[in-house]
Image (tube, helix red, strand yellow):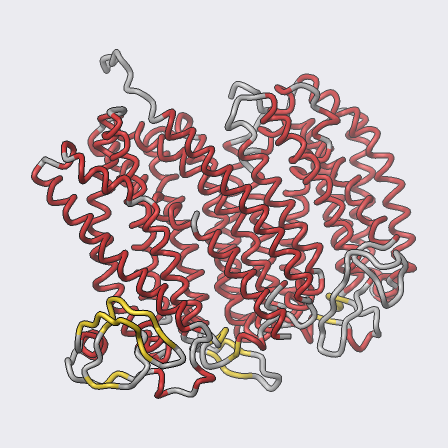
Amino acid sequence: MPDALIVHRLHFAFTVTFHYLFPQLTMGLALLILILKTLALRTGEEHYNRAARFWMRIFGVNFALGVVTGIPMEFQFGTNWAQFSKSAGGVIGQTLAMEGVFSFFLESSFLGLFLFGEKRLGPRGHWFTALMVFVGSWLSGYLIVATDAWMQRPIAYALGPNGEIKLTSFWGLLLNRWALWQYAHNMSGAVITAAFVMASLGAFYLLVGRQQSYGQTFVRVGVIAGVIATVFQLFPSGDGQGRLVAHNQPVTMAAMEGLFHTQKGAPIALIGQPDLEKQRLDNPLLIPRTLSFLTYRRWMSEVKGLDAFPQSDWPDNIPLVYYSYHVMVGLGTLFIAIMVTCAWKLWRGTLFTSRGMLWVLMLALPFPYIANTAGWMTAEVGRQPWVIYGLMRTQTGVSPLVSSGNAWFTLLGFMGMYTVLGILFLFLVYRVIEEGPEPPPLFVTPKV
Amino acid sequence: METTWFCLVAIMIAAYVVLDGFDLGAGAVHFLVAKTDAERQLVVRSIGPVWDGNEVWLLAAGGTLYFAFPALYASGFSGFYLPLMIVLWLLILRGIAIEFREKVASPVWATFWDVVFATASLLLAVFYGAALGNVVRGVPLDGKGYFFEALWTNFRLGTDTGILDWYTILVGVAALATLSLHGTLWLALKTQGPVHDRSQSAARAAWWIVLVMTFLVTVVTFRVQPQVLNNLSEHPAGFVFPLLALAGLAAMGWFIRHQDDLKGFLASCLYLVGMLTSVVFGLYPLVLPASTGPAYSLTIYNAKAADYGLRIGLVWWFIGMALATTYFVYVYRNFAGKVNVEG
């Protein structure tokens, strides 16, 4: 049923892409709120607590959407990808079940206390709930990344007589090298989103001349977190992840780079449209030998192009892999430039008055979302035509009896529902931003 | 090993039904027991801090089912494709309604989310019941262990069944009655004033409906799925489960009459656990009976994952659940007592 296959793929792609707009901010913001709470505890300044309370309101709305759009993800493994689940459930079911048992219980239990229990718990108790929400969400991230990492680089398994895949090493699954690099790369991606969101909102407050003290705090925390995360995203995490791809999925690497022919001293392409018919890049702008160096640390080493692999193993949408990778890398480079410049100006004490730079920060808001999405598209479309790399083809993983008509029905249902959810989210977050953080009290009661 | 996991998954599902059951039930009777905006706010607040955690049991049970019985997960979830997707939509709408209801102070906004909350809760209760009905009745599994059911066909039993037929609808209605009663008892326990009083009187009426439905569904089920009676007659010790349910039902009636809200609610929990364990015991070792012939049925033996994974799973499962139980006790203690609108 190749006809139904494409609908099932779209179904997962659409729901997961929309879902991940929320957790990337949740995970990054959990860290930044924890930093604000720590600052409040360390300095004793109530200002940071009020700043944290403001972000908790955005966090709450964001978290709710992450939860409700996340539930369908776990279900879809069974509903739309039954044959894949039947074969691989004994392995990836481990990490998915652990996510439920270890992180969802933790997160959901402490989230209520975190959002509504500040008065009852006191400063230290409340700081602790912030820590637990952070741990829960980052643990959840690890277990999902470990699941995906096993699909990218299946290890620690043996094949049973009926083709079922058996787990042979629990720690092998959990400590997959791919999972460690991908986690580092993914989590710093989440911090980048949160850092830009915080800095961008701070810049907005400074530009319109409202909430000056909060605006400065938001920009400062956002820029400091942002400069660390954006650099870490390139090196070591991006570099490490890239070399794993080159080593384990060389054909994916060739598609990402648009490298049609095997060559020594391979270049990287800054610009150029892959032309599959003529097997070349149109109007390429190349940096010679760089790909060889980045992959093997030697300028003249040989990098395999697409022509080194049978066409049946090529990712089935090479232009999409190529563009999503280039969008991710291009934006990542831009983020470093923005954050390093801002950090420099912050250090010199000129950032808050440099309106041009504040404009740049404010307008940068959507781009980390695009970069994170593009990164995941590179990973998942790049893995094709495999659902488990080298082990199971995507077409053999689909549910055998769910027709394309039924899959379209639910895909359209999700599209409609998520459009409404997206509008609701923007409306509610707009209200929080419009209202702004609570103003500092006019009279400070002296401590007794 | 597979029997252990069968029991663990059953426990998780029972925990889900008992916990999320009361907030679903509270939603189903939302308009019945709460008449003004303040009263409706009270209903939503009584479940506000806990519904999300309750729903996590569904995810955790789903994940555990996935890893322990992958073939069942694959077959059941793809076969029940349509009702599961509808359940997902209802869960999304309901979660959003609870979370967003109080974000904007406007009667139009609140009323809209009240309707969404109540409708989604009510339909979820019916769908969960119908799902249980499908599992008990059996589904048309093919030789590879897959099936697909339309939402309905001719509403009759046989091999060409849909999700909804007269039997599954009956179970769905019974589930709605049971969870509504469970929800009213929760509300009686957690609220004061008019909502509390209306919940108590609604519980008195609902108890009679549940009593009738229980006997009706039990009698019909013995005819629809003979395996249940077989298991009970072969292992009479299994009668402890239906007796548990009966004891829960009787105790519930007693405590409702004597207006003991806490014990009434606990008796309802007992009743739910008794009913579910009766079903589970009645089906064992089947996990998904085939209406196409016993050879096609999924059992714990042909649906289980490999032993190594199941053994490892036992270790982390017990650690994880011990932690989860600790959090739950902590949270419920923190939000113990009656809720009010100001709080």
Q: Quadrant of the C terminus of chain A?
A: top left
The x, y position of residue A330, in whole percent, is 26, 60
Residue at image position (71%, 71%) is: B146
Residue at image position (47%, 84%) is: A312
Is A322 positioned to the left or the right of B275 in the image?
left
Q: Relative to A114, say whether B105 is above or below.
A: above
Q: Relative to B176, say whether B307 is above or below.
A: below
Is A246 positioned to the left or the right of B263 in the image?
left
The x, y position of residue A211, in whole percent, is 27, 25
Nearest to the observer: residue A310 or residue B52: A310
How many numbered markers are drawn?
0
Query: Can residue B131 be seen here?
Result: yes
Nearest to the observer: residue A72 or residue A134: A72
Q: Quadrant of the N terminus of chain A?
A: bottom right
Residue at image position (21%, 63%) is: A235
Nearest to the observer: residue A124 or residue A316: A316
Query: Can residue B233 be seen here?
Result: no
Is A203 positioned to the left or the right of A158 in the image?
left
Nearest to the observer: residue B154 or residue B285: B154
Q: Quadrant of residue A58?
A: top left
Residue at image position (64%, 59%) is: A408
The x, y position of residue B246, in whole percent, is 83, 44
The x, y position of residue A429, in whole percent, is 42, 34
